[in-house]
Amino acid sequence: GENVEQHPSTLSVQEGDSAVIKCTYSDSASNYFPWYKQELGKRPQLIIDIRSNVGEKKDQRIAVTLNKTAKHFSLHITETQPEDSAVYFCAATLGYGGSQGNLIFGKGTKLSVKP
Amino acid sequence: NAGVTQTPKFQVLKTGQSMTLQCAQDMNHEYMSWYRQDPGMGLRLIHYSVGAGITDQGEVPNGYNVSRSTTEDFPLRLLSAAPSQTSVYFCASSPSSSGYTFGSGTRLTVV
């Protein structure tokens, strides 16, 4: 089955700096890669996702890149703000069909943004 | 839309007791899943469903049963609770073309 590795487990940056979180996946057939943000005591919330037919996707200060050959994808947050402090999870699955329910998560990255 | 509704929010069980965690969604989503979240372990998939009448095992299915008799509901049954099942449980749903919406979670303690 799919296995997702996520690094680093903790990340501390100064406000205004950029943050990068990296994930690798094992199943070359995986084609859907979402990222979730979880604030303390809250539920995970989808912040951005990418499919395997796209190499990069941006949404304001957040971007995700995908390298299918190397089987890794990354989350980039620019101009970080204290409210970006949270745990971020990457995930991978086979989309567009019966396997999309089998969404496997990485272990998470705790991002701290210092004012 | 209420989204994904989980009940109860908190539960304490004694070892060996059984219970059902309820999950309902009103968005007509095809996919539903149950995850458990433990410190340092991320979100681990217990069981998932791709439609009414169809379920499959995830990464950590032992000790849990599910059924999906309707599109809206996806209950998770603990057959004989063990302390190792102490965790926060999240139910999630999605349409076929986008990511999951999570419920608010159930914090379960087994003593």
Image (cartoon, coloured by chain):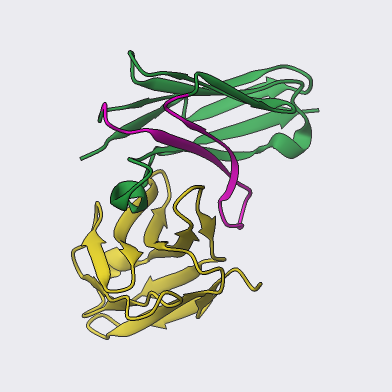
Quarter placement of the C terminus of chain B: bottom left
Q: Would residue A17 appear left or right of B53 to someone viewing this image? A: right
Q: How many marks?
A: 0
Residue B63: x and y in percent read 20, 70
Q: Would residue B98 appear left or right of B82 to someone viewing this image? A: right
Q: Image quarter for residue B2?
A: bottom right
Q: Image quarter for residue B75?
A: bottom left
Residue A6: x and y in percent read 41, 29
* Observer-nearest of A75 and B2: B2
Colour yellow maps to chain = B
Q: Would residue B89 appear left or right of B51 to someone viewing this image? A: right
Residue B67 in view: yes
Residue at the spot 27% in from the left edge and 74% down from the top edge? B53
* Observer-nearest of B30 and A16: B30
Q: Does A30 lie within the magenta span?
A: yes
Q: Image quarter for residue A16?
A: top right
* Observer-nearest of A107 and B109: A107
Residue B7: x and y in percent read 50, 79
Q: Does B111 lie within the magenta span?
A: no
Residue at the spot 61% in from the left edge and 32% down from the top edge? A111
Quarter placement of the N terminus of chain B: bottom right
**In the orientation shown, which residue stands out farthest toward the top?**
A69
Name chain A's colour: green
Residue B105: x and y in percent read 51, 66
In the image, residue B35 above or below residue A114: below
In the image, residue A32 above or below residue B72: above
Residue at the spot 22% in from the left edge and 80% down from the top edge? B79
Residue A89 in view: no
Q: Would residue B44 appear left or right of A42 to someone viewing this image? A: left
Query: Which span is picked out in magenta?
Result: A28-53
